[in-house]
Amino acid sequence: MQEAQSVAQSVGLVVPQTAHFTEPLPLKSGGVLPQYDLVYETYGTLNAARSNAVLVCHALSGSHHVAGVHADGSVGWWDNLVGPGKPLDTNRFFVIGVNNLGGCYGSSGPNAINPATGKPWGADFPFVTVEDWVDAQARLADRLGIERFAAVVGGSLGGMQALSWTLQYPDRVAHALVIASAPKLTAQNIAFNEVARQAILKDPDFHAGHYYEHGVVPTRGLALARMIGHITYLSDDAMGQKFGRALRHDKPVFSYDVEFEIESYLRYQGDKFAGYFDANTYLLTTKALDYYDPAFDYNGDLVAALERAKADYLVVSFTTDWRFAPSRSREIVYALMHSDRRVSYAEIDCAAGHDSFLLDEPQYHAVLQAYIDNIQL
């Protein structure tokens, strides 16, 4: 998370809240969570009609901290989008960010205590899916007295959650903003996730997922996983413009130490990530990505799968995003059109690759602003 530099047009200081649920949550895997916590943040004010709520769903390494500033100075990961006068204007909307089940930012997950054993769940935490996250978010909405969201918004894995909301709870979503996402992962994407998982699983400090009890963290594997993932989040052009083939020295020194600037960047990103993210959460979340396929129960027919939806949609892609290419977004648009849903589509020319959805790119934000401004409350 970026350090606070300016709080102009920010929601200001925010404090996370925790909702505890004692009603068991059945999971798609067949497992059950007997009880669980969800950590969340809210920005803005819920109106009297309770019609202005917007749910923001996070991506793989995201969290409930969507906007504003924490006491430690950390700024929300989508602070450029959420706040007074921003595309998701908190003077108009009541915005909610939730840390997904299986996460490592306070919601029940592998690093939380298993009430049955008094020890961290570790590898015993059950598999969770996009559909399970949506079910848990729906229970939180019930707790907050929100019957219907004005919009559910998400980028990447968050976009899958937004799409899934419209299928699992079609009467509870007016609009879905599906950004830099896909209806399911390609074989190549699953392959990248598997290589990243293997880096963690083969780390000698992993201890079959129970490394908490050994007082160690599989930082080497987690850092490698992040390095692999980070390569896929950037475009070739972005890496070329930022690093090229720049050497740290005037000439090659013929070693396996850092020589190219891109090597230094990836190692820094990997080490930083391994210092705050949980390896078991990484494993669970990438598996949730792999499993998501709303057309699976419809013989692969996405049109048939989306026919139960009732929301209106904005689908956004980025030209240089090769992890979730524009062609994948167009699959969603095609299926929605043939399901007689209202859908708007924008393909944004941005050189940053998959990470474009996190940036303050003028054309991108203008598209979001134009769509969101027309949401009727």
Image (spheres, helix red, strand yellow):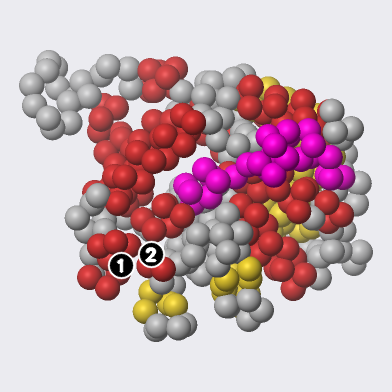
Q: Is residue 308 magenta?
A: yes
Q: In this view, does 360 lie to the left or right of 167?
A: left
Q: Are marks 1 and 2 in contact (CB under 8 Å)?
A: yes
- Residue 364: tell me if it is visible: yes
Q: Name the residue under label 1.
A: 210
The residue shown at (68%, 34%) is 300
- Residue 150: tell me if it is visible: no
Position of 229 relative to 13 (above/below): above
Find numbered disc 1 in the image and state the secondary structure of the residue it sits on.
loop
Image coordinates of residue 362 in percent, x first then y, are 66, 28
- Of 47 and 147, nearer the camera is 147
Image coordinates of residue 335 in percent, x first then y, are 77, 30
The residue shown at (22%, 24%) is 260
- Choose top left, top right, bottom left or bottom right for residue 20: bottom right
Q: Give the range drawn in magenta.
A: 285-311
Q: Mark 2 points at which residue?
A: 123
- Of 116 and 111, nearer the camera is 116
Q: Which amino acid does label 1 sit on?
A: His
Q: Is residue 37 left or right of residue 304?
A: left
